[in-house]
Image (tube, rainbow, N blue to C red):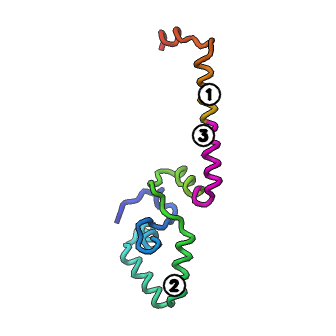
Amino acid sequence: MTHHTRIDRIGIYRSRSGMILGVCKGLASHFDFSVFWTRVIAIIVLIVAGFLPAIGLYLLAALLMKPEPVIPIKNSAEKEFYDSYTSSRHGAVQRMKRRYENLQRRIQRIEHIVTSAEYDWDNRLKNG
């Protein structure tokens, strides 16, 4: 089994490297359980509950579970962004656009200050 940080285990994600849609591997990873035994339990549920209900439940789980992030999540801000991106890509793109525009305005203010005639480069270089 692999070692997970607490942030990785906050949400349940489908594995990108699972056999069939990554549901069993994602559940096993989240609950720190063996993938083999998770799949055995899924097969037992398939036999006991019947083919259609078990397949329906499996497909429902696959639809509800988000795919695991390509890059591991390191903190709650990254998790929040990933979850918001997977639920609303348009909203996430708008947030990124606003952030870029805010950074662009800050850079323009800095450039304006540094390139202004009042900025005393000689004094700054001597005392810096």
**Amino acid type assigned to the residue bearing label 3 in the image:** Tyr
Q: Quadrant of residue 111?
A: top right
Residue 41 is situated, as x and y percent measured from the top left of the image, at: 42, 82
Residues at circles 1 and 3 in contact by the CB criterion of under 8 Å: no
Residue range in magenta is 85-102
* x 58%, y 56%: residue: 85
Q: Earlier in the sequence, mark 2 or mark 1?
A: 2
The residues bearing labels 1 and 3 have C-alpha atoms spaced at a distance of 12 Å
Q: Which secondary structure class fits the magenta region best?
A: helix
Q: Which mark is residue 54?
A: 2
Q: According to the image, label 1 marks what residue?
A: 108
On screen, residue 91 above or below 119: below
On screen, residue 19 above or below 112: below
> Which quadrant holds the N terminus?
bottom left
Q: According to the image, label 3 marks what residue?
A: 100
Residue 9 is situated, as x and y percent measured from the top left of the image, at: 47, 61
Q: Quadrant of residue 117?
A: top right
Considering the numbered disc 1 on the image, is that residue within a helix, a strand or a loop?
helix
On whether residue 87 falls in the magenta region, the answer is: yes
The residues bearing labels 2 and 1 have C-alpha atoms spaced at a distance of 58 Å
Residues at circles 3 and 2 in contact by the CB criterion of under 8 Å: no
The residue closer to the viewer here, 124 or 30, is 124
